[in-house]
Image (spheres, helix red, strand yellow):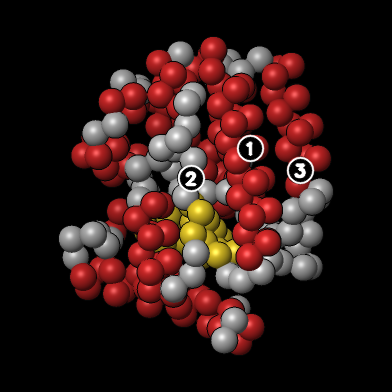
Amino acid sequence: MIKKNNPNETIIIDAVVGAGKTVYVEMLSKDMNIPNFQEPVQDNPILDKFYYDRKRYSFPLQIFFLNRRFDMLKKAAELKKPTLMDRSIYGDMIFAKLLFESGDMDKDEYMLYHDLLINMLDHVEAPKLMIYLKIDTNSAIERIKKRGRDYEQIVEREYWERLNKEYESYFAEYNLSPLLVIDAAKYDIIENPNDKETVLKLIKQKLEEIDYYKNNN
């Protein structure tokens, strides 16, 4: 459904919870001097409730995210310039699939979500570049504990493991756009300036490879 032959100018950074997406987005946005769209977490009235009662709040949470991510793409398109996004509609199905298969979202809810997503994707172009921050579950959990969001601390390890497997499966088959995979556990871009420079170099090399700068200078 997504229009691969006419990509927009958006760079997406995606990963499991705890991998460091927001930090990467802020770093790259500052370095490249381009606007960014943050994942709707801070102003999300459902997210904390979801972690305490996944079966009750899985469907409304997914609809909330889907609506916001579609809106982010529309606003990015209106800017008519390169943008960065912290997660996006392109991988939104990862969470819904996990929740449906685990029994936290029933079939009718899942099919309604699926049909709505398909309708939205018909109006979406592929991103210019997808950056996937791959990370092992142990490292992701360590970072989740370190940032200390109360509602994330109660989540069982099995949930994070299943989520990570879903992400790895999705990006093993991803073909919507050029893809850059970064080993997020290997780099500490907050505390280590050398790691930060290494990561920026990896990203810029990929952007050069896909002629990003040629079209945006």
Give the residue at x 47% y 50%.
38
User: Where residue 203 sits in the image (x, y, percent)?
Assistant: 44, 72
Q: Amino acid at mark 2?
A: Glu
Mark 1 vs 3: CB contact within 8 A? yes
Q: Earlier in the sequence, mark 1 or mark 2?
A: 2
Q: Quadrant of residue 115?
A: top right
Q: Which residue is mark 2?
A: 39
Give the amino acid type for the residue marked by disc 3 in the picture. Met
Regarding mark 3 in the picture, which secondary structure is present there?
helix
Q: Report which residue position mark 1 lands on.
A: 66
State the residue at coordinates (53%, 38%): 166
Gap between marks 1 and 3, in whole Å?
A: 9 Å
Q: Which residue is mark 3?
A: 120
State whether residue 87 is above or below residue 64. Answer: below
Q: Position of residue 135 (x, y in %)?
A: 37, 49
| Amino acid type, label 1 | Leu
On screen, residue 78 versus residue 148, left or right, reads right
The residue shown at (56%, 44%) is: 169
- How far across and down, in percent of the image, does residue 175 sit? 67, 59
Mark 1 and mark 2 in contact? Answer it, CB < 8 Å.
no
